[in-house]
Image: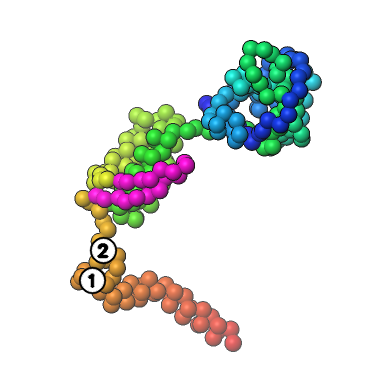
Amino acid sequence: MKKYIFLLFSVLAFALTACNEETEPGGTAVEKMAGEWVVKSEGVNDGKWFTVRTYNTASNVATEMWLEDKGLNYKIKVSVSYDARTFMTVEAVTNTIASKEDAPAPTKIKISEGKVQEGVYETPGGTILMEAHKQLEELVIDRATMEVKKDLGNKLAQVVYEGKWFTPLCEALRAFVKSTQKYVTGEVKFRLYKGNIIKAGTTSPYSLYNESLASFTTGDMYDHHDASGFITLFGLPLKVRALMMQEVKNNNK
């Protein structure tokens, strides 16, 4: 499981201090915020992802921890809000390994915003494929079937997650889902920009989209007068209820 920290920090000034080794993470006051993390920041490493370590200080309290990155060559103590999984420095703090001569390092660092997010999985390729598949489904599957497919799809995911692949229920669910996918094929175009997937067109030889029906202005497949029958049919329960309420009202006079 990858773990992510989002940082906003900047190098401010220069000073030197000695290194101070501390205890290892695990079973500590900051256990859920301790470990090795994939980090993205503004103003450092050109905004690219890199790796840092976080672990408890010698006092082992939930209000502070060490933040260390040997690649960028810094180690600082940060203030922690453990319940919120956030951390920061009130002011620029001294980099405790800045005095080492093996690599240049910032000597004062300030973290304005820091937050630990656990259980984050990034699958950009899979995300794009899932969105493309979703667009095709919406184009070729009718609404009623799509609604049932979404519900049964979630049920199938639960059954598979529980390891019940060879059960009659799983077999039946897979058969339904497979039947809905018979005509799900076509071409999907996207524009990708800064983590966003922007629709740019979807086509399929089995598309249910019909311009004449969509516009209600051309063709002879739809007549506006056809709606009157549905209005009467769907309005019947309301009409019956209104008559019943009127009768009750008259009886109570």
Image quadrant of residue 35?
top right
> Pointer 1: what residue?
218
Does residue 115 show up?
no
Rounded to the nearest whole Å, what is the CA distance between mark 2 and mark 1?
8 Å
Above or below: residue 120 compared with residue 209: above
Residue 199 on the magenta segment: yes
Image quadrant of residue 224?
bottom left
Residue interval drawn in magenta: 188-204
Does residue 135 show up?
yes
In the rendered structure, which amino acid carries the disc numbered 1?
Answer: Thr
- The spot of residue 146 in percent (x, y) is 35, 51
- The spot of residue 128 in percent (x, y) is 38, 40
In the rendered structure, which amino acid carries the disc numbered 2?
Answer: Glu
* Position of the C terminus by quadrant: bottom right
Residue at disc 1, secondary structure: loop
> Pointer 2: what residue?
211
- Along the line of sight, the residue nearer the viewer: 49 or 215: 49
- Along the line of sight, the residue nearer the viewer: 132 or 141: 132
Above or below: residue 167 compared with residue 145: above
The residue shown at (47%, 42%) is 194
